Image: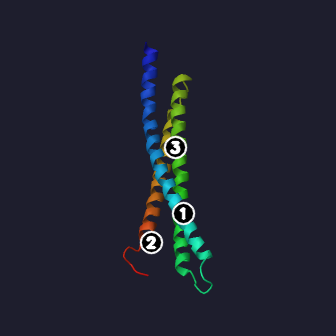
Amino acid sequence: MSEAVDIAHLIQVALTPIFLMTAIGVTLNVLTNRLARIVDRARHLELGLAHAEAGSSGADAHRQLAVLARRSGYINGAITLIIASGLLISLVVVMLFINAFLRWNLAACIAIVFVLSMLTLALSLLAFLIEVRIATAALRIGVTR
């Protein structure tokens, strides 16, 4: 009976990082959707440049493409970091079970990996914030060309 209670408690402890994985998945979905929009917009601008008249400079399109390139870099970084965070959270769950069943003392390792996961998650959110700020700064709502 005691062993069943221990396993139930272990599962409860392991569920907390699993809920974090749900949040990471939702955020990853947002990030990939933003990247897809950036890619679609860049392709549209590049197509317009390819079909532009020989006399037009296309300076505005090139400026927009430069902004999109910066944004895609930050989004790619955010995606990479949030995936790393998810992998580290998965490692935490695995180490929790190894620690319980093999009786290895992994408490310090679990704490370090969890902190690394939180750092990569925070850096991912920071990269996302920077990308949003770049996108907002590039807006020209109500400005005529």
Q: Label 1 belongs to which residue?
A: 40
Dot 3 alpha-carbon crowd within 10 angstroms: few under 14, some 14 to 19, many 20 or more: many
Mark nearer the N terminus (1 vs 2): 1
Mark nearer the N terminus (1 vs 3): 1
Contact check, label 3 and label 2, Cβ < 8 Å = no
Quadrant that contains the C terminus:
bottom left
Amino acid type shown at disc 3: Gly
Camera-side residue of 21 and 34: 34
At x 45%, y 67%, the residue is 135
The furthest residue to the top: 1
Compared with 35, 94 (above or below) is above
Q: Label 3 belongs to which residue?
A: 86
Amino acid type shown at disc 2: Ala
Camera-side residue of 64 and 88: 64
> In this rendering, would 96 be left or right of 49?
left
Q: Would you identify the image quadrant in which residue 91 lies?
A: top right
Camera-side residue of 142 and 130: 142
Q: Secondary structure at mark 2?
A: loop
At x 45%, y 17%, the residue is 4
Q: Secondary structure at mark 1?
A: helix
Distance Cα–Cα, label 1 vs label 2: 17 Å
Mark nearer the N terminus (3 vs 2): 3
Dot 2 alpha-carbon crowd within 10 angstroms: few under 14, some 14 to 19, many 20 or more: few
Q: Secondary structure at mark 3?
A: helix
Residue 138, which numbered label?
2
Image coords of residue 129 (percent x, y): 43, 60
Compared with 24, 54 (above or below) is below
Camera-side residue of 13 and 53: 53
At x 52%, y 63%, the residue is 38
Amino acid type shown at disc 1: Asp
Q: Would you identify the image quadrant in which residue 52 lies?
A: bottom right
Image coords of residue 39 (percent x, y): 55, 62
